[in-house]
Amino acid sequence: MAFHEEGRRLTQDQVHELHAHLCGTCGTSLDTMLNDWGLEEDDLTHDDLQEIDALMMICAACGWWCDTDEFCDSHDGNELICHQCAEDE
């Protein structure tokens, strides 16, 4: 049975489900999945958001959800972008 850790709104299973559903998609909203669980992004704790960010982020250039190891700084250093977008810059 999944349980909520102290200071968390999401279970580990939910975090992994978010990753599996969002990673590799474009235009998919985090809120869509959270709403299925009766949550909104504002409901998440700092720890929840940090765990999500440790696994995946949205590329500031193309909007794709990618694993965090696929990110680098943009050439101007102001945004995190995926490696593909960095090659295209």
Image (spheres, rainbow, N blue to C red):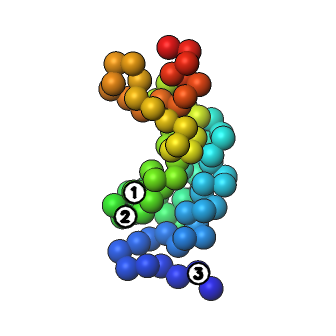
Q: Residues within 10 Å of mark 2 (few under 14, many from 20)?
A: some
Q: Which quadrant, please, contains the N terminus?
A: bottom right
Residue beneath the point at 49% across and 63% down? 39
Above or below 75: residue 67: below
Q: How many marks?
A: 3
Mark 1 and mark 3: Cα distance apart in space = 19 Å
Mark pair 3, 2: CA separation: 17 Å
Q: Are marks 1 and 2 in contact (CB under 8 Å)?
A: yes
Residue identified by numbered label 2: 47
At label 3, the amino acid type is: Ala
Residue type for callout 2? Asp
Q: Which residue matches tag 3? A: 2
Camera sees residue 28: yes
What SS does tag 3 mark? Answer: loop
Q: Earlier in the sequence, mark 1 or mark 3?
A: 3
Q: Amino acid at mark 1?
A: Gln
Identify which residue, 32 or 9, lies in the foreground. Answer: 9
Is any part of residue 62 visible from this angle? Answer: no
Q: Is residue 72 above or below residue 48?
A: above
Q: Is residue 20 left or right of residue 42?
A: right
Which mark is first along the chain, 2 or 3? Answer: 3
- Reading the image, the residue beneath label 1 is 50
| Residue 17, image quadrant | bottom right
Residue 48 as seen in the image, left or right of residue 85: left
Residue 41 vertical position relative to residue 74 in the rendered view, above or below: below
Q: Position of residue 89 (x, y in %)?
A: 50, 14
